[in-house]
Amino acid sequence: MDIDHSPPGKLSVMRASPVRWVIEFQVMAQFMRLILL
């Protein structure tokens, strides 16, 4: 919900909520599994 409020760039990643970081990590993990399998 803070997507518009957070500034673009690397700072946005640091300010982003941990939930979003975890979700992106889960998506990347699943994508890597699909490639490996």
Image: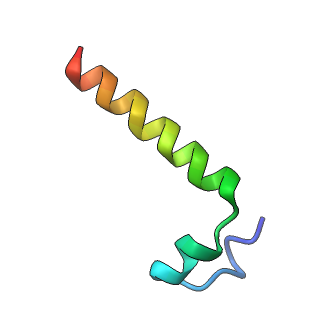
Residue farthest to the right, as pictured: 1
At x 46% / y 82%, what residue is drawn? 9
Q: Is residue 2 left or right of residue 20?
A: right
Which residue: 41% across, 33% down?
29
Report how many numbered discs are placed on residues in the image.
Answer: 0
- The colour mode here is rainbow
The residue at 21%/21% (across/down) is: 36
Q: Where residue 13 appears, x then y in whole percent?
A: 54, 71
Q: Is residue 8 left or right of residue 35?
A: right
Which image quadrant for residue 1?
bottom right
Frontmost residue, 2 versus 21: 21
Q: Vertically, is 8 above or below 28?
A: below
Q: Position of residue 20 (x, y in %)?
A: 63, 54
**What residue is at 35 percent from the left and 31 percent from the top?**
31
Q: Is residue 29 above or below residue 16?
A: above
Give how far across and how far down residue 24 sits, in percent.
51, 47
Q: Is residue 8 above or below residue 30?
A: below
Q: Residue furthest top?
A: 37
In this rendering, position of residue 34 left or right of residue 15:
left
Quarter holding the C terminus?
top left
Furthest residue in direction left, as rendered: 36
